[in-house]
Image (cartoon, helix red, strand yellow):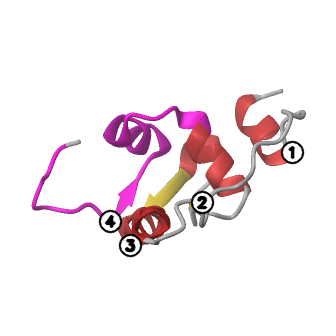
Amino acid sequence: MSTSTTTKPFWTVKELADYYGLAQRTFYDLMDRGELRFHKFGGRRGIRVSDEDRLDWEQRCRKGHDTADATVGVRPWTEPTKPTPFVARQFGK
């Protein structure tokens, strides 16, 4: 992760994945579950996350680990299922 003092107004899913070292699918799943707000300016390549929403999501991730109960905000593991319609559309499945 770089620590640039300049911020950009919107991030692409690829930029977020590269910045956090996570898979792009992780961010599509977060969007699908409503955990990460996004803007859609056209098709799949038009999905953008505002810097404000990115920082809000990042802060919510941090809060789960600052509490006495480390499981706060952690969803229990469930058996994998077929992709949701949103994810299927993004990946063309």
Point out the tag, 2 or 1, that comes first from the N-terminus. Answer: 2
* Amino acid found under the numbered disc labelled 3: Glu
Q: Gap in Å between the C-alphas at discs 1 and 3? A: 26 Å
Q: Is residue 39 visible?
A: yes
Magenta residues span 2-25
Residue drawn at the location 83% of the way across and 41% of the way down: 78
Left or right: 75 as drawn, with respect to 88: left
Q: Which residue is mark 3?
A: 52
SS at badge 2: loop
Q: Residue furthest front?
A: 68
The front one of 55 and 89 is: 55
Q: Which residue is mark 2?
A: 71
Within-10-Å neighbours for mark 3: few <14, some 14–19, many 20+? some
* Amino acid found under the numbered disc labelled 4: Pro
Left or right: 93 as drawn, with respect to 74: right
Point out the tag, 4 or 1, that comes first from the N-terminus. Answer: 4
* Amino acid found under the numbered disc labelled 1: Pro
Within-10-Å neighbours for mark 4: few <14, some 14–19, many 20+? few
Instruction: State the image quarter where residue 74 is shown.
Output: bottom right
Left or right: 29 as drawn, with respect to 5: right
SS at badge 3: helix
Q: Is residue 43 visible?
A: no
Label number found at residue 85: 1
The front one of 8 and 17 is: 17
SS at badge 4: loop
Q: Which residue is mark 4?
A: 9
Residue drawn at the location 84% of the way across and 33% of the way down: 80
